[in-house]
Amino acid sequence: MKKFDNMFIGFMLFSMFFGAGNLIFPPFLGALSGTSFWLAMTGFILTAVGLPLLVLVAISLVKGGIKTIADRVHPAFSTIFMVSVYLSIGPFLAIPRNANVAFEMGVMPFISSSWDPKLLLFLFSCIFFLLVYVVGLNPGKMEKYMGRWITPTLLVAIVVLCTVGFVNLNGALQAPTGGYEEGAFFKGFLEGYNTMDALAALAFGIVILTAIQQRGVRDEKQLTNYTLKAALIAGGLLTAVYVTIGMIGSKMASTGSYENGTEILSAASTLLFGKSGTVLLGLIFTLACFTTLVGLTTACGQYFSKLMPSVSYKAAMTIVTLVGFTLSNLGLNQILKVSVPFLVSAYPLTIVLMLLTFFNRYFKNTRIVYGSAMLFTSVFAILSGLHTFGLELGPIQKVRDLLPLSSVGLDWVLPAVAGTLIGVLLSQLKKPDDSASSEVTDVKASKMTMVK
């Protein structure tokens, strides 16, 4: 690789991660957490930055990537889990969410109230998705478009907003509200789910590894090393942006009450720059959402074309783009209503699966360990998702309330640990000829017989 290639790939990875949720949630966290800002932001960064980096490293360590990791549970689980993830970070949730936010922040502030917003959304999404499709058709040049041109422009715009905000905003930190009064760290930890970046990392791993391999890197250790460097560059930029726009939110809390992060950033940019602030913020949101859409559609196109060899990458890209375009025109509120319960269910499974990957050498791919851990985790993760969606769980809810950390939304942790330990115990009780190690012994024995 050339001297600056890894840096530009890191920039590209940052731009793919940095979308609508990455802009909306940190300032709102800052406004609500107030004097507990640093505790809440630490929890947020763990799941919004640390977990995605963990996923990328885990994928680079295992030949075959996330499919090989998920296959350790069961091939059927692997397919269902990955298809669900790609559909959620792709055309069903994340892609429509980003397109809608780009429209809300990049177009709506500049139009007359007499215009039909539905018609404008349709026209905007036609142009927006066409550009996404054109760039995404050539994944090999994504680093050139996004890493060298779009990301620096996006970073400059964010730096201008944050620098001026730090200098001119002097509001005192308010008392914590909105669930941050107690357990601010855990509240921030759960808010990090909303960025969807850990799930996106499952898909972006393919894109990053492809970009590195296209530069002639084939050695597995070098692939891991370059992936880690790119991940650290992207993670460092994400952390810096989260902290700075989060601080802007905390300083803006004293100027009024806000419903979400977009209102906070809109008010801050108008206060700092006047009407030109609206243009600056619109540029930031549009570029951030565009780069994320390119990354998501490309990752989905690559995955589904590999899952179904009869479908070409171009055909898969076309389908993903058209479905994302169609759902984008349903409106943002409907999308967000479904996304949060799904994330509450999907994130625990992702966390446990990645952690098992790093400890895999201690139980040597034993399927019963993976299966037991994921079974116990999935039961309580799905219950959490149903509860978040608003369904009454009756007596089951009382059982959930008895579990440690249930008050902070982490009731799945103890079942995950219990499931892992039970799996390890069962693997030790299995007959030697049923274990993974015995399979290796059988293979060696057969090879010796062939030699004789």
Image (spheres, grey):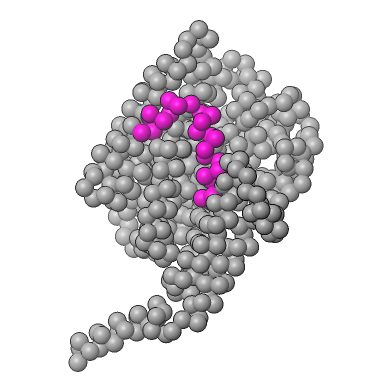
In the displayed structure, 186 sits above or below 160; it is below
In the figure, residue 449 lies in which quadrant?
bottom left
**373 over 398 or under it: above or below:** below
Q: Residue furthest top?
A: 114
Give the magenta range.
323-347
In the picture provided, is 157 more to the left or to the right than 434? right
Residue 136 seen in the current view = no
On the question of residue 416 being in view, the answer is yes
Q: Please state the horizontal and vertical placement of residue 344, each as a whole percent of the image.
A: 56, 47
Residue drawn 51% across the image and 31% down it? 334
Residue 266 placement (x, y as % from top left): 61, 23
Characterize the magenta stretch by its predominant secondary structure.
helix
Q: Any magenta on residue 335?
A: yes
Horizontal side, residue 33 vs residue 88: left or right: right
Q: Residue furthest front?
A: 395
In the rendered image, residue 4 lying in the magenta stretch gets the answer no
Q: Quadrant of residue 136?
A: top left
Return the x and y of residue 387 as percentages of the image width and height: 61, 45
From the top left corner, tell me how far across and down residue 49 is, in percent: 56, 48
Q: Residue at x 44, y 20 (%)?
A: 121
Q: Is residue 135 left or right of residue 365?
A: left
